[in-house]
Image (cartoon, rainbow, N blue to C red):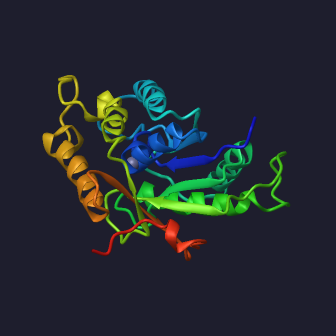
Amino acid sequence: MPDMDVMAIGAHPDDIEIGCGGTLIKLAQRGHSIVLVDMSRGEMATRGTIETRRQEAAAATAILGASARENLELEDGNIHSSPEARYRIARVVRKYRPAVVLLPWYEDRHPDHYHTSQAAYEGLFAAGLVRLETGQAPHRPTRVMYYMGWYEFDPTFVVDISEQFEQKMRAIYAYTTQFLPDDQAYQQTRLTSNEYNWHLTSRAAHWGAQIGVRYGEAFRIRGTMAVDDPLDVSFATF
Ligand SMILES: [Zn+2]
C-alpha cells in the first residue's frame, strides 16, 4: 500500500465531514490520497444504529473522495487516551503512513472530541517510537492540523472551500439518520433542525469572509508555520 498524503481522524462518523470535509474534497480533487479514521461507531447517538451509521459513513467517504476509512471501534461516549486507544492509533498510522494528519480541536465542547484529539496526538507520537511493537515500521507524521468542531479558535489559516461547499453538505447529509428531519421513526434533535443547517452554512460563510471568499474552513496548528517565500503566501491586509 502506498503512503497516504492525508489522514483525518474524528471521534464519531460525521465529525470529519463537518469539521474539514470541504478541505478534504479539495485535496482529493487535487489528486492527494486521503484516509479517514473514526474512533467510534457512534452507537451513543440519539438516532440511528451502528449499521445505518456504517452505511452512511461509506456513502460520505465516496462523496469526500477518500480512498479508505477505518473505524477503531472504541466505546462511543467513553473515548480516552488509554493505552489501547493510543495503540490502535499507532497501528492505523503505521499502516497508512500519512504525511499530514487532521485532528479535532483539543478544546472542543464534546468530551469525546477533546479526548480523541489527545489520544490521537499521543498515538501519533507513539507511532514514531522504534520500540513500540506493532509488527510495523515506525512512522510519525510531522504535520498535525486541528479542525474546528463546536468551539471556535483563532485560526492559523483558513482554506477556501467555496467550490467544495455544496459537496461538503452532501457528505454531511449522507448521514440521513443524524441530520434529516423527515424520518418520523426517530425523535428530532438539534442536528435535524433547520437552524443546524443554517449554523453550518453561516459558520462556513463567516470563515470565508475572513479571507474574502464565500465559504471557508478554519485550521490551527501547534508551533510556528514556516514560510519559504513570503510572496507565495496569500492574504489581504486592505
Ligand atoms: Zn462528534
Residue drawn at (35%, 41%) of the image: 163
Question: Measured from the top left, where is residue 234 in percent x and y?
Answer: 43, 65
Give the left or right position of residue 10, taking residue 168 as reference: right
Question: Measured from the top left, where is residue 5 in percent x and y?
Answer: 64, 47
Quarter of the image that includes the N terminus: top right
Question: Measured from the top left, where is residue 236 in percent x and y?
Answer: 33, 70
Residue drawn at (55%, 76%) of the image: 224
Residue 73 visible, this orientation: no
Give the left or right position of residue 134, taking residue 4 as reference: right
Residue drawn at (41%, 67%) of the image: 107
Residue drawn at (39%, 28%) of the image: 49
What is the quadrant of residue 135 in the picture? top right
Q: Residue furthest left?
A: 194
Give the left or right position of residue 25, taking residue 193 as reference: right
Quarter of the image that includes the C terminus: bottom left
Question: Measured from the top left, where is residue 16 in percent x and y?
Answer: 44, 46
What is the quadrant of residue 229 in the picture? bottom right
Residue 79 visible, this orientation: yes
Give above or below for 67 relative to 150: above
Q: How many marks?
A: 0
Give the left or right position of residue 123, taking residue 209 as reference: right
What is the quadrant of residue 172 in the picture? top left
Give above or below for 188 relative to 150: above
